[in-house]
Amino acid sequence: MKQPIGVIDSGVGGLTVARELMRQLPKETFLYLGDTKRCPYGPRTEEEVRAFTWQMVNYLLRKNMKMLVVACNTATAYTLSELQESLDIPVIGVIDPGARAAIKVSRNKRIGIIGTEGTIESHAYPDALVSIDQKIRVNGLACPPFVPMVEEGILSGPKAERIVSHTLQPLKDRNHIDTLILGCTHYPLIKDLVQKEMGNHIQVISSGEETAREASLILAYHKLLEKNDSTPVHEFYTTGDIEKFRLVANSWFDEPVQILKSIELEHVPSSAY
Amino acid sequence: MKQPIGVIDSGVGGLTVARELMRQLPKETFLYLGDTKRCPYGPRTEEEVRAFTWQMVNYLLRKNMKMLVVACNTATAYTLSELQESLDIPVIGVIDPGARAAIKVSRNKRIGIIGTEGTIESHAYPDALVSIDQKIRVNGLACPPFVPMVEEGILSGPKAERIVSHTLQPLKDRNHIDTLILGCTHYPLIKDLVQKEMGNHIQVISSGEETAREASLILAYHKLLEKNDSTPVHEFYTTGDIEKFRLVANSWFDEPVQILKSIELEHVPSSAY
């Protein structure tokens, strides 16, 4: 039997990361767990986010996963180091892959980052970038209208263009960035709009694509890559409304979600200890 | 004192990988060893390549390196697994990073790969690509004129354009690739020419850039990243003519090479055992 890879997120945003993981690692089986009921994590305390994340992790550990991807910026910022130290499987988050990709492509060392207010205020991306290269200058911009817009399915057309244009204006007015990191898992769905608004001279980095790329390396490095070519069957779990989740998942994926289960996390232990 | 990262190559080609490593990891110190005297490795037997590679590795192990980058396609193909199993430091090669980057960017799963005759005949890139995704179709093309052209410094102008255009013609005539891997460490120096010849709809992947990106991840993953911001002083070693090496290195790097030493490898043990 194929050993699965766990992907956890506060809700549906991490599905863009799961989609990229499935595309770049087509032999692998994924278990996706979205804590839709308690989403968003952004406004929650660090203690809450840690407790909820551990509940998700402990739930998936019972399913024998060989690797864990934390596909949520907030959960990555608060729990990645702790998970990496506690678990005996590889754990990767969504922040560092985007940072490393930006360092690779930027020529003028001026990098923009857009995300939720929580992610921008956490300074997680600037910290990751500057820890590698102190000469990098980072321009962060919180884009609160983007998540609700994406979740309402407004992904193109004049209204979407207007919102994107208006929200990104402060970033366009500032220093001459040559690279922009999409620091929120919802944003890849409006990547084309952002690219058009910022101009083709800006390299737009999608954290999901980069996280999948790094997951591929870490699996290979640990000799954990699946060799069997048979088509994998992925499983999706949500703590919230199952039909709402299916609607979003089916509109974001090329193929309809097959196995989808509703679960409760409240009674799962919230720490590994 | 900073613990260095070792970079080995059969000659000068790996300098393009070293340049990218220095750009993406500006706090790290690098030791570059080019076996210019016995280069190229392409036409040599597997046994010879393994013996020479082990001599380089054993020479650098005495200098307390924390990581090894095999910046040579031939040496990677023949020795990477063996080195990874034998050494207790992380070891990365140049083949898999290019393959993973191509999988990330390709949308139609048709990937081209250009390299020396040895690299193309070894099937190392197609093997790496297909082991991850069996639906990928690979078009390999050996480009023998490119290495001598680059080493003679013919990097632009009508003659260079004519050679590139003529050499790449078979690849342009074949299936519709959307991604092309530069599978030889000399080729990044003519990346712009290749891009122009293939057209802007083709994504050109430079193995050196991708190897540096993956080195950055592996260092972070093992908590080996240098924290000290002081400017590193890199060291270069060659088994061949020191002035010829300096000439090439200085024309490829933005800053002149400082510490450059001539060494003999013939008396270094050729295996770890």
Image: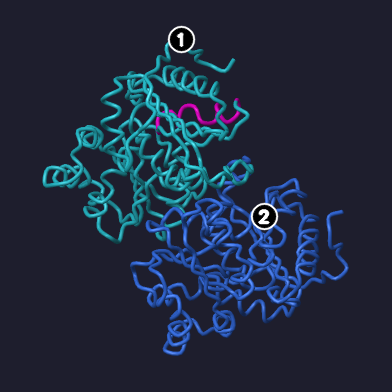
Chain colours: A blue, B cyan
Name the kind of residue labelled 2 in the image. Answer: Ile
Q: Position of residue A265 (x, y in %)?
A: 82, 69
Above or below: residue B208 compared with residue A57 = above
Disc count in the image? 2
Q: Mark 1 points at which residue?
A: B267
The question of residue B83 being in magenta is answered with yes
Quadrant the C terminus of chain B occupies:
top right
Apparent side of residue A245 relative to residue B74 in the rendered image (left or right): right
Same chain for the residues at labels 2 and 1, yes or no?
no
Q: Position of residue A170 (x, y in %)?
A: 45, 79
Q: Where is residue B64 in the image (x, y as percent from the top left)?
A: 57, 26
Q: Callout 2: few (<14), some (14-19), or many (20+) C-alpha neighbours within 10 Å?
A: many
Name the kind of residue labelled 1 in the image. Answer: His
Above or below: residue B56 compared with residue A254 = above
The question of residue B97 being in magenta is answered with no
Q: What chain does mark 1 sit on?
A: B
Seen from the viewer's position, the closer of residues A237 and A203 is: A203
Above or below: residue B195 compared with residue A34 = above
Q: What chain does mark 2 sit on?
A: A
Apparent side of residue B20 relative to residue A187 in the rendered image (left or right): left
Residue farthest along the front direction in this orientation: B230
Seen from the viewer's position, the closer of residues A192 and B33 is: B33
Main secondary structure of the magenta stretch: helix
Give, as a single range, the part of the protein colored magenta.
Answer: B73-86
Residue farthest along the bottom direction in this orientation: A159
Q: Residue at x 49, y 68 (%)?
A: A139
Q: Where is residue A143 in the image (x, y as percent from the top left)?
A: 54, 78
Dot 2 lies on which element?
A: strand
Does the CB distance between marks 2 and 1 fall below 8 Å?
no
Q: Distance between the residues labelled 2 and 1?
A: 47 Å
Q: Mark 2 points at which residue?
A: A5
